[in-house]
Image (tube, rainbow, N blue to C red):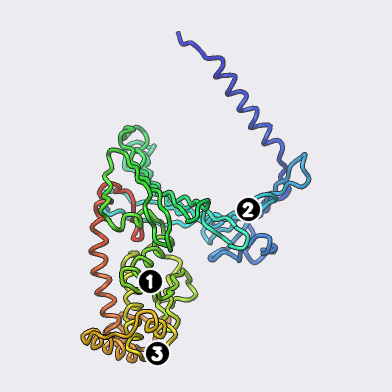
Amino acid sequence: MVKINTNTIQSAKTTANSIRQRESQYILLKKTEQLPIEELNVDGKVWGYGVYPDSKYFTHVKVGKKNDSKYNREILTFYDKNNNMINRIFVGNNINKQSREYKYSIEYPEDYPTIPVAERKHIKIKEWFNNEGWKPIKEEDQFVYTMDSKSDKKPKKLQINSNVYDYSHDKVRINASMTEYPTTRGVESADAYKHAFVEMEMDNEIPKIKQIFNTTNVNISKDDKFLPYRFLLEEKKQISLAHEALKEEGIDNLGINVKISPSCVPKNSSGFFDSYFGNIWFRKILRKTHPIRLTAHEVDHAKRYAMIGRLGKRRSPFEQKAEEKLGLITDLNEQEKSYEYLIASENYPKLEPDENLRINKDYWDNELEVLARKKEDKKSKEYNIGRSQLLKQFKYIAGENTL
C-alpha cells in the first residue's frame, strides 16, 4: 500500500488555481496573423529598433489586464523567408524594452560523421537601458542532436553554452557555463552530465576569471591563457580576442576601436582594418569563421601600420598617434622592416567589394597580407591546443566560432 501525502496534493491544487487566476487577469487586445514586413507601421521610438535584417514577415500582439486599464504589454515578432522566428521585441509599462534575437544553423562537431549533425540555435537577449541603448543580458548556444536509434522515438542529446551578464558591479561580470546533458530515453545515466562554470570580470573588454567550478568528469586547464575567451559567445568572444591581441602586440594604447558592423566591411571579407583612423571592423555574422584567425589577421595589420607611423612619416591620424604614443623606431633592423611595410602599403591595390581576393595577385602577394596570413597560422596553432583539449570533453560543441 502506498501512503498518499494529502498536503502535497493540496499544495499542487493551490498552485494550479493560482496559475489559472493569474491567466484569467489578462486580456488579448490584439493579435495579427503573419503580415508582410512592408506593412509594418509602428513607432520606432517606442520599440527602440530598426527593421530587423532578413525580416520578411511580422506579427503584433497586445495584452491588457481586466482590472488595470494602464497595464500594457506588446510583442513584435519578426520572421525570415522560411518562417523562422529571428527577433522578438517586448515593450510595456514599468518594464525595460527587451529584444530576443534567434539564429539557426546546422553545424558539424569535430568527430563528424561519427556524431550526428547539430541543430544549432543561438539566442541573444538584450534590454534597453536609458542613455546606453541595447545591452546584452543573456546569450545562449543550444546544440540539439537526434541520435541514431532503432526506436521511432529518437533519443536527443543537448549541449548548452550560456553567458549571463551582470551590470551591478563597477565592471561588467559574465557568468558563463558549458553544460552537456545526458542523452534522453535512458540511453545515458545522470552520471553523463557535464558542467563547467566560470565567473568573469571584463577589464577593458578583456575577461578575467574570478572563480571556476566544474563537475568531477571535467578537467579545466588553468594554464590555458585563452580559457576565458573559450567561454564567451559570438560577438563578445571576437571583440575580446581582438583586445587581447592588441595588448599582446603592445598597441592597446592607440585607441583602436573594435566593432561589429557589416556595413563597414566589404562583402568579400570577414574583417577590415581601417588604416586611416585605426579601427578594426568585423562582420556581424561570424559563425563560419575561426575567431583567432580573423582577429590575428586584422591586429597584424594594425601593428604593421603602427610601425609605419613610427618611421616619422606622420601621414594618417592613426600613424601620427602611433608615433606620438610609441615614439620613433630607433632599432635599425625594425626600421628596415618598417620601410618594407611602407612600400607594401603604397603598393596595396584598390579592391572591389565583390571580387574574389584569392585570384587578385597584387592583393594576395602583398607583403602586408602575406604577413597577416602567417600570423593567422601561428596564432591558430597556439589557440587550438586548448580548444582541442576542451572539445575532447565537450565533444557536442560544434561550429567554427565556438571554444
Q: Mark 3 points at which residue?
A: 314
Is residue 95 shown to the viewer in this render?
yes
Q: Label 2, label 3: how many angstroms apart (C-alpha)?
A: 47 Å
Q: Name the quadrant containing residue 265.
A: bottom left
Q: Which of marks 1 and 2 is in front?
A: 1
Categorize mark 2 by other alpha carbons within 10 Å: few (<14), some (14-19), many (20+). some
Task: State left or right for residue 128 relative to residue 320.
Answer: right
Q: In the rendering, at what x and y percent does residue 174 appear?
A: 44, 52
The C terminus lies in quadrant: bottom left
Helix, strand or loop for disc 1? loop
- Depth order, front residue of 301/319: 319
Helix, strand or loop for disc 2? loop
Q: Mark 2 points at which residue?
A: 96
Give the residue type at disc 1: Asp
Give the residue type at disc 3: Arg
Q: Residue at x 39, y 64 (%)?
A: 238
- Depth order, front residue of 254/10: 254
Categorize mark 1 by other alpha carbons within 10 Å: few (<14), some (14-19), many (20+). some
Q: Mark 1 points at which residue?
A: 252
Task: State left or right for residue 5 relative to residue 250.
Answer: right
| Residue 324 drawn above or below residue 257 | below
Q: Choose the circle earlier in sequence order: 1 or 3.
A: 1
